[in-house]
Image (cartoon, rainbow, N blue to C red):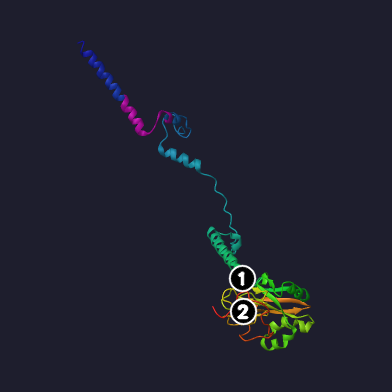
Amino acid sequence: MVVVIPIIVLVVMAGVILIGASRRRERNAAGLSREARRNDRTNPVLDAGSSDAPPTGRQVEQEAVAARQVEAAPVVESAPAEPFVAPDPQALGVSRRQFFNRSIVGMMGLGLSGFGGACIAFLWPQGVSGFGSKLKVGNMVELLAEIKDKNGFLYRPEGRMWITAYPNGAVEKARAAYSSTELAGMAAGVENGFESGVVALYQKCPHLGCRVPECVSSQWFECPCHGSQFNQVGEKRGGPAPRGMDRFAMSVVDGVLTVDTGTIVQGPPIGTNTTGQEAEGPHCIGAGGGH
C-alpha cells in the first residue's frame, strides 16, 4: 500500500504536466503569445463587438477597411498637352564617353600640331652666321694694309679663307678667266681707286682637301700633303691638284668687302696664270711634281 501511493501521485503529476504542455503547444501553434493576447484585449477594434466574445475575422477586416477609407479627392480636369520641343544638346551636358573621346582627339591634335611646328621650325631658313654665310670682312683700305703686315697672306678663320691682294695690272687678263662674282673683289682696286684688289680663297686644297698654308719665302701656297703649289692668287703652279684653289664670291659696297662663304666658286683650270708671279724665294715644301 505504501508503494502504490507514490506511484499514483507520480501518474497524476505526469498527467498534469502533459495537459499543460499540450495547451502551450496549441497556443504557440496559433501564433499568439501572452503579450499578443494582452494587446488584443486592450484593442478597441477587437472589443467593438460583444464585451464577452472576441470579434470574428470578418469583423476585424471590415473595421480595417473602414479605417483605411478616405474621402475621394475631387477630379480636376488636366491642362492641354504642350507641344514637344527638342532639348538643346549643349544644355544636356557631356557624357563621360563624349568627354574621353573629345579629350583623346584634342590631345592627338595638340601632338600633331607640335610635331608639325617642329618640322616647320627645322626646315625654316634660320639666320646663319660664320662659315656658310655672308661675312663683312672689313674696309678695303684697312684690309690691304693688314695683308702687307701679314707678309702678303691674311687668314680669316671664321670664313675658313685666305685673303690676298690682286694686282691692278692683271685685271684685264682676269676678266677673260674669272666670273663676275670673283671679279667684284679682284677689280675693286681699278674700279674704286684702291692700291689693288683682293681675292678670297678657300683654305682646302682641291686635290684631297688638306688645309693649304702659305709659304712666306716663296710667296706661294704650298700643300703639305702632296706638294701642290699655287701662286699668291690661288692659280695652280705645280703638284697633283686638278685645278687652282677654289674661291668665294665677293662684293665691295661703299669700300667694304663682303665675302659669301656659302657660294664656293671652282678654281681656275690648270694653265691659268693671270699675274705671272714666279716663286720669290725657296719653297717651304719642295717642288711638287706628284704624290
Q: Which mark is residue 120?
A: 1
Looking at the image, can residue 127 be seen?
no
Disc 1, SS: helix
Q: Position of residue 118 (x, y in %)?
A: 60, 67
Amino acid bearing label 1: Ile
Frontmost of labels 1 and 2 is 2
- Decide whether residue 30 is among the magenta residues: yes
Front-lying residue, 150 or 86: 150
Quadrant of the image occupied by residue 162 = bottom right
> Residue sitting at 41 percent across and 28 percent down?
34
- Decide whether residue 92 is among the magenta residues: no
Q: Position of residue 216 (x, y in %)?
A: 68, 74
Residue range in magenta is 20-36
Residue 154 shown left or right of residue 10 in the figure: right
Q: Which mark is residue 229?
A: 2
Front-lying residue, 174 or 62: 174
Amino acid bearing label 2: Gln
Front-lying residue, 135 or 289: 289
> Residue sitting at 78 percent across and 76 percent down?
141
